[in-house]
Amino acid sequence: MQLRIVSYNIHRAIGIDRRFRLDRIVSILDHVQPDVALLQEVDSGAPRSGGLDLARELAGLLGYAYYAVGHNVNLRKGRYGNATLSRFPILRERNIDLTVDSRKRRGCQHTRIEARKPTGRAHIIEVFNLHLGLSARERQRQISLLRHSREFMDLDQAHACLVGGDFNDWRSQLRPIFTEELGFQCATSRGDDRKYPLRTFPAFSPTGGLDKIFFRGKFRLLEARTCHLRISRVASDHLPVIVDFELQ
């Protein structure tokens, strides 16, 4: 069974031209056709995005039967956080608080997804959709909070598991924690030694690989890339990363 995963910081659907244009995000995701989309900076009820519930709007416009939202930041009016859209049933969801001290609130949304093709067996996938902080020390502590969460600690390493999102990790300092300590592989790396991340930020001329997807368990990596649509250079300040897997 093949599975396409996308991680995309949609920047509240406000592009680098400072215009709120949800239709551009819809066009990109419709072109890519992910089975599961991990989205960050997703507004709900905020005036800057027309007061819309963006997760609900995107799920409806793109035909996703299932979605889950983990709000992290409360605004004067409205809030925002991470959202996971899925073509397959979401069996369980919880937002894991990754806030460190008095810094900006951050979170990781955990969803348990039952992936099944019409004629195939079901695969249970544990998905963690996160958005980490801006300082290296903060990010280190946030990964510690994640790895010691009940949802993460209860998983066997052989179980199909994905961790993706906006890591804000310019120098890939978190990669060894996942690959050497936690048994993951990085899907969004390039080069012969696969140490260089796919570049996603800023979208119009990417220099940093902030958006990553790690995997372990019953996955075989088929392909990873960024979106090359012209519209993706302006729709958000990040490019989406697209990863194709085979579930074994």
Image (cartoon, rainbow, N blue to C red):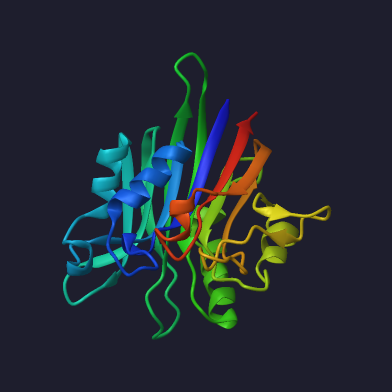
Q: Position of residue 132 (x, y in %)?
A: 49, 70
Q: Position of residue 153 (x, y in %)?
A: 56, 55
Q: Name the quadrant of the N terminus.
A: top right
Asked if residue 160 shows in the view, the reply is no
Q: Which quadrant of the structure image shows residue 171?
A: bottom right
Q: Residue placed farthest to the top in the image?
A: 119
Between residues 126 and 42, which one lies in front from this camera angle? Answer: 42
Q: Residue at x 23, y 74 (%)?
A: 75
Q: Residue placed farthest to the right in the image?
A: 192
Note whether 162 is above or below 62 in the view shown.
Answer: below
Q: Which quadrant of the structure image shows residue 21?
A: bottom left
Note whether 43 is above or below 161 in the view shown.
Answer: below
Between residues 140 and 191, which one lies in front from this camera angle? Answer: 191
Between residues 165 and 89, which one lies in front from this camera angle? Answer: 165
Residue 30 appears left or right of 139: left
Circle count: 0
Q: Name the quadrant of the C terminus.
A: top right
Between residues 236 and 95, which one lies in front from this camera angle? Answer: 236
Q: Residue at x 33, y 59 (%)?
A: 13
Q: Position of residue 221 (x, y in %)?
A: 68, 39
Q: Residue placed farthest to the bottom in the image?
A: 102
Asked if residue 119 shows in the view, the reply is yes
Q: Position of residue 224 (x, y in %)?
A: 64, 45
Q: Residue placed farthest to the front in the image?
A: 230
Note whether 219 is above or below 17 in the view shown.
Answer: above
Q: Residue at x 52, y 20 (%)?
A: 121
Q: Residue at x 27, y 40 (%)?
A: 61
